Image: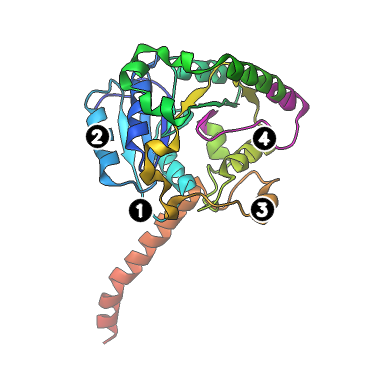
Amino acid sequence: MKHLKSKISVIVSCFNQPNAMRLVLEGLLCQSNQEFELVVADDGSDPDSRELVEGFRKRAPFPVIWCTQRNQGFRKSAALNRGIRSSRGDYCLFLDGDCVPARDWIVRHMSALMSGIDFCVAGYVHLPFDETRDLSTERVRSGDLVQLASFRQRCTFAAQNIKQGLYIRLGAAGRPYLLGGNWAVRRAALERINGFDEGYANMGREDSDIRNRLVNAGYRARSLWNSNWVYHCDHRLDPRRNEPTHIRGPADRDYYQRRKRSVLCPRGLRFMAATRNVKRDRARREFQRPERASMLG
């Protein structure tokens, strides 16, 4: 296995989207900074997704880790926590399995984090289906992705960046705008707030929740909306990702509002470790019962 030369972990969430994932992996293979590990946090995909990642591992110049869980509906938060626990970097950069990064995506996020910022946020270029369908690994490899961002989109990102920067300076509630498929954070901050809240199973707002808790804990943010967008593939490229049992439902507004001023979440990174300890202790007790019963007899 290749040795980890850096302290950067790129964590990619996915579910049954091998066509888009192939483009994402190619984008990571073309990064100007190759000193990172890749962790694929899978939410119960069919075997072809793992086969794709295993094939990619053989030609990647960086470590590639696959971690998965059973398909029990939309449980992205649990998959991401599993990915974080499997990673070793001091900095965690997050992508969705349908968000293709440009060549300097890692460099730009790391430049912000290394300047003393705790987490940074950025946006998506939403590709229509015809552009998504025509996007090839060769085009990703050529570095030609930047042309997919129109002048109007660039202006929108510039305006969004000004707004998010102002919100950050003013300490506005519910800001900065964090999209789960393109952001980065110091590992120490993630561990301090106990990672993603696994209470957000089969519903949305898990991205807003982790943003709220980072801000509540006093961590500093920076907006990279004007410089570090990714290219979001149309979901129709991988129809299986849209299976009815795996579509994210509306958020539980009451649950979100109750958690809005929290720092820690009850079911996060440390929840799984505690669960494993309980199961281990239970197994030990069950293993010892027959022997105890025979002694009593």
Please report whichever mark, 1 or 4, sits nearer to the chain's N-terminal start.
Answer: 1
Quarter location, residue 280: bottom left
Q: Residue at x 53, y 42 (%)?
A: 195
Q: CA distance from mark 4 to mark 3?
A: 20 Å
Q: How many marks?
A: 4
**Magenta span has 178?**
yes
Question: Which mark is on residue 253?
Answer: 3
Circle 3: is it few (<14), some (14-19), or many (20+) Cα within 10 Å?
few
- The residue where tag 4 is placed is 215
- The residue where tag 2 is placed is 54
Q: Position of residue 249 (x, y in %)?
A: 54, 52
Please report whichever mark, 2 or 3, sits nearer to the chain's N-terminal start.
Answer: 2
Question: Which mark is on residue 70?
Answer: 1
Q: Position of residue 225 (x, y in %)?
A: 60, 21
The answer to whether the residue labelled 4 contacts the one labelled 3, judged by CB atoms less than 8 Å apart, is no
Indicate the quadrant containing the C terminus: top left, top right, bottom left or bottom right: bottom left
Q: Position of residue 207 (x, y in %)?
A: 57, 40
The answer to whether the residue labelled 1 contacts the one labelled 3, judged by CB atoms less than 8 Å apart, is no
